[in-house]
Amino acid sequence: MDDDNFGSFTQSETDDDSNYDGCDTSEEDIDTDDTGETDDESVDESDDVNPNSDSSEEGDWVQVLANEAGPPTVRYTGHCGPIHPPQPDALPIEYLKLFITDSFVQKIVDETNLYASQWIQSHTEYLQQKKRSIVNLWIKQGQTFVNEILAFLGVILNMGLIKKPTLRSYWDCTNPSQATPWFSKHYNRERFELLLKFLHFADNSKIPPPDHPAYKLYKIQPVIDHFQRTFKSHYYPERKISIDESIIGFRGKTPHLRQYMPNKHHARFGIKVWCLCEARSGYTYGFEVYRGTAGMQVSDNGATYDLVMRLLEKADLFHRGHHLGLDNYFSSPKLFEDLWQNGTTATGTVRTNRKGLPMDAVKKKLKNKEVSERRKGPLLCVAYKDGKKTPVLLSTSSKGGYKIVKRTGKPDKIVPQIVDDYNHVMGGVDLKDTKLYSYLAERKTLKWTNKAAFSLIGTAVLNSYLLYVANTSRSHPLDRYKFMVSLVESLVQNYEPVKIIRKRRTLEQIQAVSLSPDPVGSPSHVALSADDGHKIVKLPVGKKRNCIAGHPKRVRSAIFAQNVMEEFALNALLFFTIK
């Protein structure tokens, strides 16, 4: 979520140097941030109560005493860091190969060639009519192969480093001040556009029916499965982790995947992705692409509860002592208590209409900077007055009271301990998004599959860089820009661009035309032979086309020869009548 900080208590004012977002205290933002289509999980009220009701399920909530000891400590037993990494002095491409494997690239090659063959077979008549279709180049040049796909990915990465307004502007060298000859040197533009057209990851002939649960994500499911497996195979996160939503910006047609999130600054329309990230670095350890609740079994605890438990279970992070950061979209007393039972602590904001909250503390009128604290076993609930905002937080890790926060160049601040803990554990997903979109090639496209796949591949590139930083033996590791430059050069080095062979006129033909007494508009430029079977036709008013008879000045004319079998006399009469 795009959470705001607690008023003036920004992360830069804490005693930690990590780049995390602060705590969301805006009830207005809370109500609008996670609303999407009618089947969105934000319409989950199974864990809510009427905020205007005087009844509450306080249970054993008690007031927090001064200088309390806090909940019992849950020891972290994980072994964070790289798992089976390359040698410490390995090149950046070796880290990328951990995620972009040979089998994954071969899968892209096979499915792309298969889809191209299927498309060509189903459009045979169209291609016979459209001789100048770009697809005819694919037929002449042949199918794609591994090195070409690797170079294709290298070009995509380089487009994220060099931002230009249009795709063709990367190959445009007419303006020397804006030219980027690297692209035309290492990849043919028409071949690149063909790969964008035919790029596929699954067999279309095996797609399930629209009412099947796997239908919506079928076309990118192999990409999702691959990265869900590799992301957790080569790195283990530190104690502090975050769960939040991210978005792949897309405004086109999707199989009911597009969501609207007004508080997202990067893109308001797109495909929602739930991410599990390390809070300190933003490493994506697990993720799930949202496809709606239709056809999904939701427990009595609600869809958001099920989502958090499912992400942690798939990532195998239970009973390891992790500290989880959540925002008010996910948090509830029931969720925090069950996480505690599974050896996981949590801290997060909570909506005031959740079941099980101490309503006397939540509804209490507070003065500015005043808190109201209640505890129920390991679970702490704090309502905090911060200007006009009164956020409510839950934690099974924090203790009550305040903490002095040191600020550079400013007086120290006193904030509730739970606020400081939240600011340090929440924000891993936002940090990941900030890093990802800095060098992600996001270009408008009609194919949502390409947009989603390139975003996941970009996440894999980011993860490979974070793995490199954690494992390299260099005293001064490469920054991310130089790391990606090295990847681009390595991906394209084994690929020779496809040469486009065009039929050109011979020198004798050019000289013969140039010596003609009346080359412009001459009948010799038009096939008037009955044997050739041409008919002279005049284009509509205002329409012209290039002369195809070989004129060196590329004369544009409204008259052309149409290939039909008619008599020579009629052709000549029609031509001279129009002339």
Image (cartoon, helix red, strand yellow):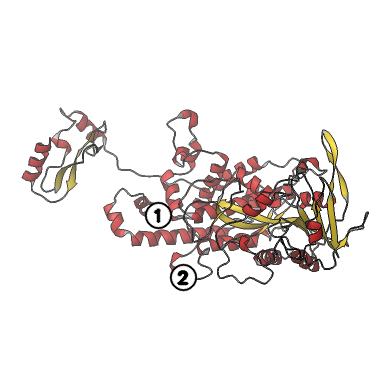
Residue at the spot 33% in from the left edge and 59% down from the top edge: 123
Q: Nearer the viewer, residue 565 or 448?
A: 448
Amino acid bearing label 2: Pro
Q: Is residue 354 visible?
A: yes
Mark 2 or mark 1: which is in front? 2
Q: Report the residue marked by disc 1.
A: 142
Q: Position of residue 139 (x, y in %)?
A: 36, 54
* Image coords of residue 117 (percent x, y): 39, 61
Which quarter of the image is occupied by the C terminus?
top left
Q: Quadrant of residue 83?
A: bottom right
Q: Is residue 239 left or right of residue 170?
A: right
Q: Residue at x 42, y 31 (%)?
A: 174
Q: How many marks?
A: 2
Judging depth in this view, the residue of 194 and 184 nearest the camera is 194
**Secondary structure at numbered mark 1:** loop
Q: Is residue 292 left or right of residue 357?
A: left
Q: Are marks 2 and 1 in contact (CB under 8 Å)?
A: no
Kindly report the distance in space between the C-alpha atoms of the residues bearing marks 2 and 1: 32 Å
Callout 1: few (<14), some (14-19), or many (20+) C-alpha neighbours within 10 Å? few
Outermost right residue: 67
Q: Residue 152 location, x and y as percent?
A: 51, 49
Dot 2 alpha-carbon crowd within 10 angstroms: few under 14, some 14 to 19, many 20 or more: few
The amino acid type found where label 1 is placed reads: Gly
Residue occupying the point 57% across, 44% down: 488
Spot occupied by residue 32 in the image (x, y as percentages of width and height):
62, 53
User: Which residue position holds label 2?
Assistant: 209
Q: Residue furthest left?
A: 569
Q: Earlier in the sequence, mark 2 or mark 1?
A: 1
Judged from the image, the secondary structure of the residue bearing numbered disc 2 is loop
Work out whether residue 1 can be spotted.
Answer: no
Q: Which mark is residue 1?
A: none
